[in-house]
Amino acid sequence: MIDLRSDTVTQPCSEMRKVMSAAPTGDDVYGEDPTVNSLESYAAKITNKEAGLFVTSGTQSNLVAILSHCQRGHEYITGSEAHTYLYEGGGAAVLGGIQPSIIPFNSAGELPLELVKAQIKPDDYHYAISRLVCLENTQAGKVLSPEYLSKYSSMATKHGLKRHLDGARIFNAAIKLEIDVAHICRYFDTVSICLSKGLGAPMGSILVGDLKTIRIARRWRKMLGGGLRQAGIVASAGLYALENNILRLKKDHEKAEILATALQELDIKISEKPQTNMVILDPEVDTTSLRNYLAKKMIRIAGNRLVIHKDINDEDIEKIVSACSEYRNDY
Ligand SMILES: *Cc1c(COP(=O)(O)O)cnc(C)c1O
């Protein structure tokens, strides 16, 4: 089976499993798991933040971040297709009494600053208090430019807004831009990073930020049931991923580009040239018939995207292209 539904489907490699089985552990709720502590401090170091927090998932990471920045009656501004708004069960509203205030992402995956500004509520008790603005990077595989981030950050700071990044795939962005991940993180108060996507760990995310915010986030994590005990077993996989699997993301990007070019040659339209590991199909493409056809060839896709990850090799790309070519002949 060739699985292109998401980069979450990656399997831990044998080296990673070896590291997991040998990981020193302790009780992380007491702060005594040496491997979790190493992961948290390593993540903080490479992002140039004061502290890190190992959490069970990206959803939990974003949620504890929003809960830590905002209070009941506050609002956070984000994209109408943002994961923090659309795909997290409304957690901030359900559990925090924090209202999302949404605007559409533009074609670059940015929140247009004029729209963000227009969304900030005046100091008037009719309104919720605008407190936070959340970006996503990469956003549907697109990379936010440092120029945009710099402007975004000044604007947010000027209006007293906290800045959170859902950086589920921040390393894809950093690799694409050939910059240090810390150069992206400097524009944010908190950044959430998924270890379980392209980086290939079986589970977990890391939230990084200043000490004070991470301390508050740790309390929320416990309340949400995310205080784990001998979590070093899984944290070691995350540490392995950060130490070994970042640079190889470039290979995923190259494969995505090869696949996108081949699809275009077959006249299967893509929305635009992929910037990272996602090939997004044009809305014109009948994704249902393509999906059903590919499924018979043991190739799985979901929605309108084909996601490349470490368990897709060159031979798989060839198989996908030839299956798409047969699809073209049959339809
Ligand atoms: C996957 C993802 C998350 C959430 O991660 P989970 O570990 O699945 O909860 C958050 N934001 C974005 C953009 C994602 O792709």
Image (cartoon, grey):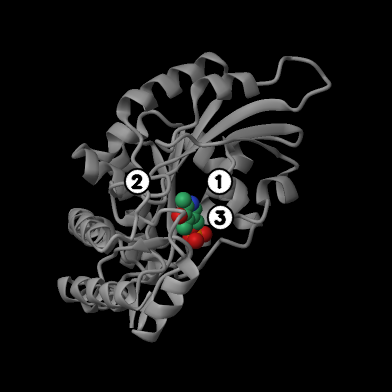
Q: Nearer the viewer, residue 169 or 60?
A: 169
Callout in the foreground (1, 3): 1
Residue wearing tag 3: 60
Classify residue 119 by image quadrant. top right
Which residue is found at the position 28% from the left and 78% from the top? 326
Which residue is found at the position 26% from the left and 42% from the top? 174
Residue flagged by tag 1: what amino acid is it?
Glu
Residue wearing tag 2: 170
Question: Looking at the picture, how far across and down is residue 31, in whole percent?
Answer: 47, 56
148 versus 86 height, above or below: above
Query: Is disc 3's CB within 8 Å of ligand 1?
Result: yes
Question: Looking at the picture, how far across and down is residue 259, in whole percent?
Answer: 23, 62
Callout in the foreground (1, 2): 1
Callout in the foreground (3, 2): 2
231 versus 193 height, above or below: below
Task: Find numbered disc 1 in the image and state the secondary structure of the residue it sits on.
Answer: loop
Residue flagged by tag 3: what amino acid is it?
Gln
Task: Find numbered disc 3 in the image and state the secondary structure of the residue it sits on.
Answer: helix
Classify residue 67 by image quadrant. top right
Q: Earlier in the sequence, mark 1 or mark 3?
A: 3
Query: Is disc 1's CB within 8 Å of ligand 1?
Result: no
Residue flagged by tag 2: what amino acid is it?
Ile
| Cα distance in 3D space between marks 3 and 2 | 17 Å
| Image side of residue 165 versus residue 62, left or right | left
Disc 3 to disc 2: CB gap under 8 Å: no
Is residue 57 at least partly visible in the picture? no
Which residue is found at the position 42% from the left and 45% from the top? 139
- The 10 Å Cα crowd at callout 2, few under 14, some 14 to 19, many 20 or more, is many
| Cα distance in 3D space between marks 1 and 2 | 17 Å
Residue wearing tag 1: 81
